[in-house]
Image: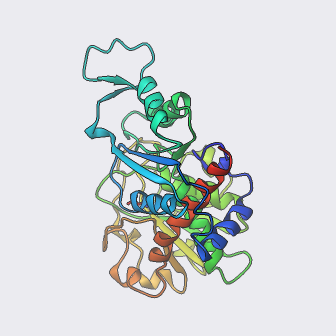
Amino acid sequence: MKKYTNIQDIESIPEIIKEAIQLKQQPYQFEEIGQHKTLVMLFFNSSLRTRLSTEKAAKNLGMQVMILHVNEAWNLEFEDGAIMNMNSAEHVKDAAQVISQYADVIALRAFPTLKDKEKDISEYVLNSFVKYASVPVVNMESATAHPLQALTDAITIEELKTKSRPKVVLSWAPHPKALPHAVANSFVQMMSELEVDFSITHPKGYELDSEITKEIPIHYNQEEAVKEADFVYVKNWSSYAEYGEIVSQDSNWMLSKERLGAAKFMHCLPVRRNVVVADSVLDSENSVVIAQANNRTYAAQIVLKKILENL
Ligand code: CP
């Protein structure tokens, strides 16, 4: 694997899921592969799971890890040919090349502005690092994608499914803040590649990018949509059409235990309890969110392993 910026970088999804599950059984079996290799993790935004699971994954492979909270470093310029007489002290062209002197792999988290749609869709932060770094880049959640989370989710479904073609539903949920589309986008893309009966449910106005959802069925009635589901993945996102806006906060979309039924409850976390989902769901045996969080390590580890094998 040359990079991991979206799930299209995976050669075979069924194969990588299988390998990740095997790796989970013996996480230290490849600890030689990362000897004398360094992962530099760059954070433009906050993280708990991605930060810790990716570091753990790298260390399981014998790598050294360095972390930079970019907002504590120099303010980066991304525009080619910019006259840098304002707030930006360093161009990404220089920064990415310099970081590549210290890193064998760069992992990067940079959320969208949710204000400038065109700029966000261009993935200018992630793509600038891909362009100027001389080492592979891993996406730890960008403006439009969270491929490590999507691989985690696929691993979790594979481990927990009880039928060959489970029914999986992605449901929007209310949230007081405008959130990105990245988790939902990558989950949709991943489910489109798996042997699952997949649909999406959300209120009108929360349609995701149609280039991503393509022909996937969309339902506007959550109760109907989740009936007899095996997995219900709950996530908030802001409007894509009215870019970055909150067009509904309808609390009827908070997933209840009654509505979940016998399905397994999935969420990438962090989650706002009793806003996005009821305590009674999160604290029930149906919730697999901690198993999901655990699998973040093995998703990151299999990706790093494949990148290290290609160095
Ligand atoms: N799910 C996820 O990416 O969690 P963090 O934002 O805490 O990394």
Closer to us: 267 or 263: 267
- Ligand 1 rendered quadrant: bottom left
Relative side of 176 to 107, left or right: left
Q: Residue at x 45, y 38 (%)?
A: 102
Q: In which quadrant will I find the C terminus?
A: top right
Asked if residue 222 shows in the view, the reply is no
Closer to us: 280 or 5: 5
Closer to us: 54 or 184: 54
Percent position of residue 136, x then y: 58, 40
Q: Quadrant of residue 272?
A: bottom left
Percent position of residue 96, x then y: 46, 31
Closer to us: 79 or 255: 79
Percent position of residue 297, x then y: 51, 65
In the image, residue 176 sits, relative to residue 39, either above or below, namely below
Percent position of residue 202, x then y: 49, 61
Q: Quadrant of residue 176?
A: bottom left
Asked if residue 272 shows in the view, the reply is yes
Relative side of 55 to 151, left or right: left
Relative side of 51 to 166, left or right: left
> How many labels were placed on the picture?
0
Way the structure is coloured: rainbow
